[in-house]
Amino acid sequence: MAVIKSALELALERTKNLQIDEAVQKANEAKLEGRRAAGRFLEAPDSVDFKAIFDTIDTAQRQTFLGAAFEVFTAQIQLPSTSTVETSKFESLGKAIVALCGLSSKFTSERETKLAQQQARSLFQQIIQFLGQYGEEMKRVEQAIRNQWAPKLREKERQMAAQLGQSVRIDPMSDPEFAEFYRKNIDAMRKNYSGALEEAKSQLLQLCGFEEH
């Protein structure tokens, strides 16, 4: 015999689902607010007071707010496409990340909070140094690739000069063989550095107690 649910049971089930939906909605709103705050900071750092915004967020969603802002900032920490590192940009990001870390609910005392902020600041300085090392390594590897390819390139220039009857200079990047050789070596180097950078970013995430969203 089928069990017929009472109107009260059905109403309770609907209420339960509604409460879950409301919690999800609040979490999504906190994430959105965190991303917006981080976006405003990237445009104008002095215009954003994370503590003031944090205080307006529902207590249950504050960590979600912080984690969302944190993700926006760490997404900005990437290997530079050139050998130049935007030090001022990264120093600004570091200050924001340390500020967010100081608001994390992971820490139960002011002493724990200060220690975590100190560790986060130190780790971020290491990241900046790491990016600088990458820039120097990029220049060194590029020069090594060009030096290694130089004999082949000169031979190609000699052959073309013999055919054309005049001196020829080839831009290395216009040569398909060189371009492929260059790409493989640079990609291998970037892969190694990217792995190390992502590990450092994960350490920051764990140190500050933020969940991935």
Image (tube, helix red, strand yellow):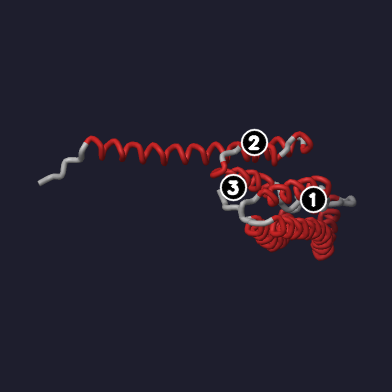
Distance, label 1 to label 3, CA atoms, is: 35 Å
Distance, label 3 to label 2, CA atoms, is: 15 Å
Neighbour tally class for label 1: few under 14, some 14-19, many 20 plus, Cα within 10 Å: few
> Of circles 2 and 1, which is in front?
2
In the visual, does 188 lie left or right of 153?
Answer: left
Distance, label 2 to label 1, CA atoms, is: 29 Å
Neighbour tally class for label 2: few under 14, some 14-19, many 20 plus, Cα within 10 Å: some
Q: Secondary structure at mark 3?
A: helix
| First reached walking from the N terminus: tag 3 or tag 2 | 2
Kindly identify the residue that appears in the image at 55 percent across and 36 percent down: 29
Label ID, residue 63: 3
Report the amino acid beneath label 1. Answer: Thr
Neighbour tally class for label 3: few under 14, some 14-19, many 20 plus, Cα within 10 Å: many
53 relative to 95, above or below: above
The residue to which callout 2 is attached is 36
Residue 27 percent coordinates (x, y) = 52, 41
> Of circles 1 and 3, which is in front?
3
